[in-house]
Each structure stands twice: as structure tokens, then as C-alpha cells.
Image (cartoon, rainbow, N blue to C red):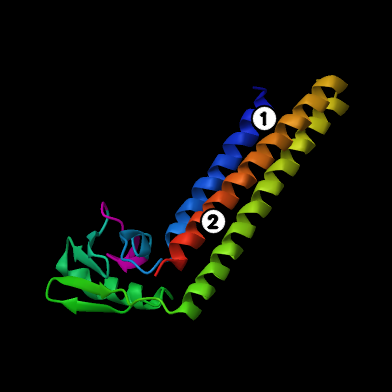
Amino acid sequence: MDPITTSTKAQMDKVIEMLKADLSTVRAGKASPALVENLVVGAYGGTQKLKVIELAQIQATDPQTIVITPYDASIIGEIHKAILESNTGLTPVIDGQLIRISIPPLSEERRQELVHLVNQKLEGGKIQIRQVRHEGMAEVKKQLNDKVITQDDNQRLEKEIQKLTDDTISQIETMGKQKEQELMVI
């Protein structure tokens, strides 16, 4: 692979990874640590993510409950506050040295709202992919104008970049269909 297409593919892969992480935060009616693990908590005079390695252990004890066990019980209030302010619609309850979050079943209306949200996130991902394609094509055009590559190389590289774009957008659409199915299962 040419350095331009290699760089373009790497950038597209980063977009896919970011989109996967973003989609994992959309709840599908069942408890998952991904719903809260990336929340930023103001603790120890700074901010940190809630993830397992940093502040707390997060477990889905059953399909409807997430349990967060802070490593330091003194920050339980800050974790509680971060969850409430996160706009996830989750209601944490402090239970001694841990926090319990009950995940209510999703109504049909809420499922439709979440599908709409997923579609917005997917469209944002597609826009980023098209931007990466645009940058790759611009680099190819620049190399052609600077006489670094031939017209044949130009056409070959443009086709490779377009194929990468098409494959990546197809991957995004597949991710979207899977997430939509996950959301619509009662």
C-alpha cells in the first residue's frame, strides 16, 4: 500500500474506533459498564475517568443493575454527582460503600429516540470518513501537481481511497443496523 492510502486507512480506523466507543454509551435496555465507565469525575483536585483502573470497579450484576465500587470511599459523593450530571438519564443510589444504578426498561418511544440518536452519531462518523477521504484525495492531487506521482498513479490512488471510503462507510452502516436491532429488542 502507498503511504497516502496507509495513512488514510489509519485515520478511518480511528474514526471507527471512536464511533464504536460512542455507540457503546447508548444504552440498550440492559446494564453495561460502558454506560458509565467514561464519565469524568472531579476528584482529588482534578478530573479522572471512572474506568476500572482509575477510580472504581464497575460491574453489571444482572441485566438491570450496575454496581460501582469506588477504590476510595471518600469520593463516592463525587462519583454520584458525576453520574447525575452526565445527562444519561441514570439515577444512582448510594448504598453504603457502593453505588447502585437500576436500569429501567425502555419504552417504545424512548427506543425510537435512541435509534434517532444512534443515526445522528452514525452520520457524524460518515462525515468524518468523507473528510478523511477529502484529505487523502487532496494529498494525491498535491503529489500529482508536484510531479511526485504519474497520472496513472493518481487514478490508482484515488480508486484505492474511494474503495477504503466505501468499505468503511459500509462498516459504519453495519454497526448501525446491529445497534438498532439491539435497541429494538424488548
The residue drawn where x is 60% and y is 64% is 120
For the point 33% across and 68% down, the residue is 42
- The disc, 1 or 2, on the residue closer to the chain's N-terminal end is 1
Q: Which residue is mark 1?
A: 5
Task: Give the amino acid at mark 2.
Answer: Lys
The residue lying at 50 percent from left, 70 percent from top is 114
Disc 2 crowd rating (10 Å Cα; few below 14, some 14-19, many 20+) is some
Instruction: Classify residue 117 as left or right of residue 24.
Output: right
Relative placement, left or right, of 38 versus 142 is: left
Q: Spot the residue most to the front.
A: 186
- In the displayed structure, 32 sits above or below 173; it is below
Residue tagged 2 = 177
Kindly identify which numbered label has been placed on residue 66: none
Asked whether the viewer can see residue 77, the reply is yes
Residue 179 rendering spot, x and y as whole percentages:
48, 58
Q: In which quadrant is the N terminus drawn?
A: top right
- Residue 26, above or below 167: below
Q: Quadrant of residue 102?
A: bottom left
Q: Name the element at disc 2.
A: helix
Rendered location of residue 136, percent (x, y): 72, 37
What x and y, as percent, mark residue 137? 77, 37
Residue drawn at (40%, 76%) of the image: 106
Which image quarter: residue 171?
A: top right
| Mark 1 residue type | Thr
Provide the residue span drawn in magenta: 40-53
